[in-house]
Amino acid sequence: MSFTEQREGIEAGRLDAFVDGAFAFTLTLLAIGGESIPDSSAKLLQLLRDIPASALCFIQIALMWHAHVRWRQLCHANTRRGLLLSLVLVFFALIFVYPVHMVYASLCNALSNGLLSPDFVLRTPTDVRAVFACYGFAYACMSGTLVLLFRHAAAQALAVGHDALKPRMEAVTWSMPAAVGLISAIVAICLPDSTPAALWALPGYLYFLLMLTGPVLRVARRRYQEGGMV
């Protein structure tokens, strides 16, 4: 191994350690106890009612962290673009943690009729608009950054004569949540206050479009294998 390769490996390791640490810090913000330890069983039980929402947030953020891990497995080169996009991903993660908790807390509250996450309820159209808009834009930004990372990995693979199927399929996979998050945020902003109460859940229902990721991925894979995907 040359000195240059060794130095790039060390720098890549530092970047990955920083990203891992930043995501770990983000996940600590989901701690159900907050800054203080409950001093009674009643307060403890109250905090435990927020566990399902915290668990869903944990899974959502962990999936994005693991996407960055997969990117590194596909892109070993230490490039300025990879560094910049990784830092942007961390920045969006620190913003994303609060909207994602609000969305899942309100969802758990609604599905349990107030039994879970009792402290967070979306009461007005303004509440719904603000939470889903913030969540949608943050979700789209994080997913979009992952798309750019995997497209960069694909370009690096082609530059050294390797097959770019895996990074391109990863880019297609993350393009779906990027698009759906953006559409949901725009819909949330555009819904007028006179919208019937039943339709205020529309920005949330739009995330069911993510079920189309599988079919879209199969089409993209077929196009790539046929040589028609750039």
Image: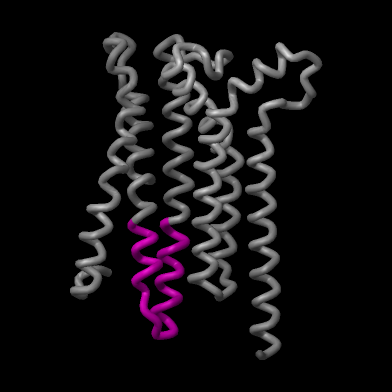
Percent x, y of residue 164:
37, 74
Secondary structure predominantly adopted by residues drawn in magenta = helix
- Give the tally of numbered discs: 0
Q: Would residue 131 be found to the left or right of residue 20 on screen?
A: left
- Taking depth in this image into account, of 18 and 61 the one nearest to the observer is 61
For the point 78% across and 13% down, the residue is 40
For the point 39% across and 60% down, the residue is 170
For the point 23% across and 73% down, the residue is 225
Percent x, y of residue 149:
47, 61
Q: Where's the C terminus, which quadrant? A: bottom left
For the point 38% across and 59% down, the residue is 171
Percent x, y of residue 226:
18, 74
Indicate whether 148 appears above or below 213: below
Most extreme residue toward the front is 41
From which residue to which does the magenta span run? 147-172
Q: Would residue 174 be found to the left or right of residue 109 on screen?
A: left
Indicate whether 101 appears above or below 221: above
Q: Magenta stretch: residue 154 in it?
A: yes
Most extreme residue toward the bottom is 2
Q: Where's the N terminus, which quadrant? A: bottom right
Q: Magenta stretch: residue 160 in it?
A: yes
Percent x, y of residue 132:
42, 27
